[in-house]
Amino acid sequence: MTQVHTEAIGDVLLIEINNPPINAGSLGVRQGLKDAIAQLAAEPTLRAGVIIGAGSTFVAGSDLREFGQPLHEPQLPDVLAAIEGCAKPVVAALHGAALGGGLELALACDARIALAGTVLGLPEVTLGIIPGAGGTQRLPRRTGWVRAIQMVCSGERITADTARDLRLVDEVVATELQANAVALARQLAGKCRISEESVPAEEAAAIEQAEQAALRAGKGRPAVVAAIEALRDAARLPFAEGLARERAVFQQLRGSAEAHALRHQFFAERDAVRLPADVQATPRGVQTVAIIGAGTMGTGIAIAALDAGLSVVLLEQDEAALERGRQRVADYYQGRVAAGKLQANAAAARQARLQPSTDWTQLARADLVIEAVFEDLAVKLDVFRTIDAHARVGAVLATNTSYLDVDAIARATARPQDVLGLHFFSPANVMKLLEVVRGAQTAPDVLATGMAFGKQLRKLPVLCGNAFGFIGNRVYNAYRKQCEFMLEDGAWPEDVDQALQGFGFAMGPFSVADLSGLDIAWRMRKAQAATRDPRERYVAILDHLCELGRLGRKTGAGYYTYADGRQGKTTDATVRGIIEAASAQRGLIRRPLEPAEIQRRALLAMVNEAALLLAEGVAQRASDIDVVLVQGYGFPRWEGGPVFWARQQDRARLEQDLQRLAATSGHGFRLADLTPMLNP
């Protein structure tokens, strides 16, 4: 199929890119553009050209499937050189998105016109690379150095109006993009090459501040460092030399392990939102959502729904709790307005769609009911019996549970086919991950509704089977348990936390536990105590901390102590005494654990549990596990996830190390067969 079509509209050549769904800059697109520019240059009746995208977008990036494969000519820089070298002006007509190579293509044109609502950006750093076709060289010549650093190093997406203010776009139009672009092309007197402009002068202190901020936010990753260096080249080198250096660094980074991992995560996220064939169905419509529970989680879900344009009924059992929830929502929007992130009228409109209530009959208005109460099965069963009595026929009923049995909850109703799990992550209005849990009797259109609802909230929904902890908490529980074993073996909490942060986790497991509150895990452990196998290796350190009232940050002490909200660098004598006593009780001689051993043991525990989940069908694809751990649990994105990490390891050593881990972990550790997971 031809991916670039040309049509003469009078004396203007319309060059249309047609490579659905996102008009990615594939080989066919690149060759088609180069041929079209040659046609424009050769035909004397043509005075200008317009490049436009078919369908819903301009060009939303390069074809990532070509990365890691042999290069094929022409490359994008060759196409852009042809555009700049053409004696006739070329206009880029932007709509939908102009991202990555799409924005680089637009910047090589002589003028740019955008439809209102278009987004523009250079997201390459988020894929472990830098722009490779002049993005770091042309962008700062228009935006200035400081703004270019902010955009390139974060992958920020900006609106068409912002792009116009930054001189990246010449005009923004509400309608008739093609006609306006053709008219603009006819008005151009000649060529206008951004490459011939200079980078505007800025204060050295402002540049230094922007660079340091970008390095901190990007955790000093290689692509961020390289992007800053390339942007410096734009100001200190001739354009052609800066362009050549940018391309060389781009080629070097595109083959790196980090870029490979980030591409894996990109494709994994794209696949995660797809339902398997046996449950594909048309979603039920959702306009009004009822949320039961006005605590932190419930109000976070409410805010996410309000931001998505939905109407929300927020239900509580008494007026005092309801007022606290309503105030949380009001405070959130007040803060957004004060920070300049939201217009006051938009905030007011969102809050106007919130109806706080203590009247259960209001559930009859809802298309989707979400229970977000205390994580206790008896409490949730009672709530669902009441939901069943008041929710309308055909409404989707969801439980926001982290661990509990969705089927047991569904059996509290007369309509288990309408029940599913929606496991939000806190804060629910911020975290992208949403585990959509499939019960034994959940209807296909209910699952489809859960997935569609997640996308409506701009979240990343991942389908899970109904098993303890679903995907995320199940893997994290195995990881945390192994970290507790390492405390008994000889490590201190700070040793484990620092080692895993060194690997790239956002926080170590014991800092996370203190932040969440140790009593959450303690309650879960007490609930499982009656069914726990006494032969299983069980670490009681957390239990002893809770018995002392050390519940984490909220009580000023947990694994660590806290003063003015700041965590102590090391654990105190009380914690160390409890840990040493646990080691002695198990008959272990404590020994220091090196960071590499800590990291590998923790990762091996994750990998083993991931393989078990896949074998049990809790995860429908291995890459879903990587998405969940990266999006919800702080696993470093640039390592791809535990499955991706395992696939990069030597198979024989991996299996030997897992056997040693099983011996160290003791009774109850199930050694997984890695073959299905490692051979996708």
Image (cartoon, rainbow, N blue to C red):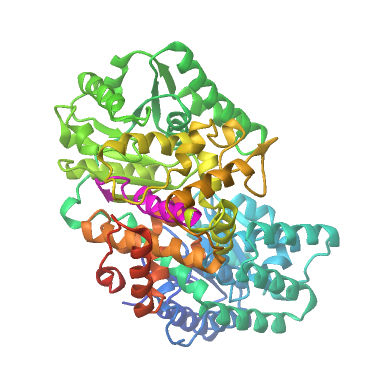
**Percent position (x, y) of residue 329?**
52, 26
Residue 105 located left or right of residue 435: right
**Percent position (x, y) of residue 431?**
47, 45
In the depicted view, which residue is nearer to us: 356 or 398?
A: 398
69 part of magenta stretch: no
In the depicted view, which residue is nearer to us: 642 or 446?
A: 642
Residue 515 located left or right of residue 644: right
472 part of magenta stretch: yes
Query: Residue 311's quadrant in the figure?
Result: top left
In the depicted view, which residue is nearer to us: 637 or 607?
A: 607
Q: Quadrant of the N terminus?
A: bottom left
Count the marks: 0
Residue 189 visible in the current orientation:
no
Residue 27 located left or right of residue 568: left
Q: Quadrant of the C terminus?
A: bottom left
Above or below residue 273? Residue 456 is above
**Percent position (x, y) of residue 262?**
48, 67
Query: Residue 306's quadrant in the figure?
Result: top left
Which region of the structure is painted magenta?
Answer: 464-487
Magenta span: chief secondary structure:
helix
Q: Residue at x 30, y 34 (%)?
A: 399
Residue 532 visible in the current orientation:
yes
**Percent position (x, y) of residue 203?**
85, 60
Q: Residue at x 38, y 72 (%)?
A: 657
